[in-house]
Image (tube, grey):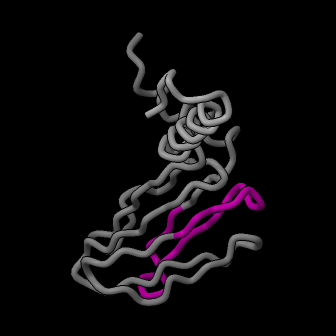
């Protein structure tokens, strides 16, 4: 730890290291979300995230899934993954609306909104119906 007995330069380096460690471990860069797949459907029809956030797709079903997106600028294909496994995607800020599907089960669809304004707007809209007056 930093303490006053250290000299000027050593003290600055020590404090800089502490600040960097706190910043690095604070999760300031991105959030992580979990979307489950169960009963041949996604656990949510949509989520709103920030650019740089990560989504873990967790197969809690008893069948294989293949999660993908053909949305321009946000294309990905996680390939087939078995029950009890997880695949991860990090989303950038190039595409604000990403349509996600399962190639094995065509009715499995969801949308990911990737933009701070979309996130705020969507979440406020979702909460407005649940607020007590």
Q: Is residue 130 above or below residue 121?
A: above
Q: In the rendered structure, does residue 91 fall within the stretch colored magenta?
A: yes
Q: Quadrant of residue 100?
A: bottom right
Give above or below for 87 relative to 14. below
| Figure quadrant of residue 123 | top right
Is 28 in the magenta? no
Q: Report x, y in % for residue 125.
A: 56, 32
Relative placement, left or right, of 59 versus 72 is left
Residue 13 on image: x %, y % = 63, 38
User: Residue 129: image x %, image y %?
Assistant: 45, 27
Which residue does the image show at 38% across and 83% down from the upper left?
65
128 or 18: which is nearer to us? 18
- Rendering quarter of residue 130: top left
Q: Which corner quadrant holds the N terminus?
A: top left
In the image, taking residue 41 as reference, residue 55 lies left or right, namely right
Residue extending furthest toward the top: 133
| Number of numbered discs | 0
Quadrant of the snapshot with the C terminus: top left
Answer above or below: position of 53 versus 102.
Answer: above
User: What residue do we see at 46% from left, 57% from top?
Assistant: 45
Q: Nearer the viewer, residue 13 or 92?
A: 13
The residue depicted at 25 percent of the width and 75 percent of the height is 61
In the image, is 70 to the left or to the right of 33? Answer: right
Q: Is residue 42 visible?
A: yes
Please give the name of the residue rendered at 38% of the width and 15% of the height, measured from the top-left corner. Answer: 132
Please provide percent x and percent y for residue 26.
49, 40
Residue 121 showing in the rendered view: no
Residue most extreme to the left: 62
Please give the range of residues in magenta. 89-110
């Amino acid at each position: 730890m930093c303490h006053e007995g250290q000299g000027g330069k050593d003290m600055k380096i020590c404090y800089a290291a502490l600040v960097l460690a706190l910043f690095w471990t604070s999760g300031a860069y991105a959030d992580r979300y979990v979307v489950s797949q169960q009963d041949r459907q996604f656990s949510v029809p949509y989520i709103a995230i920030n650019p740089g956030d990560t989504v873990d797709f967790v197969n809690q079903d008893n069948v294989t899934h293949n999660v993908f997106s053909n949305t321009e600028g946000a294309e990905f294909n996680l390939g087939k993954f078995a029950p009890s496994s997880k695949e991860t995607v990090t989303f950038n800020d190039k595409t604000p609306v990403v349509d996600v599907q399962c190639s094995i089960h065509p009715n499995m669809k969801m949308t990911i909104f990737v933009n701070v304004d979309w996130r705020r707007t969507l979440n406020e809209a979702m909460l407005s119906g649940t607020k007590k007056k």
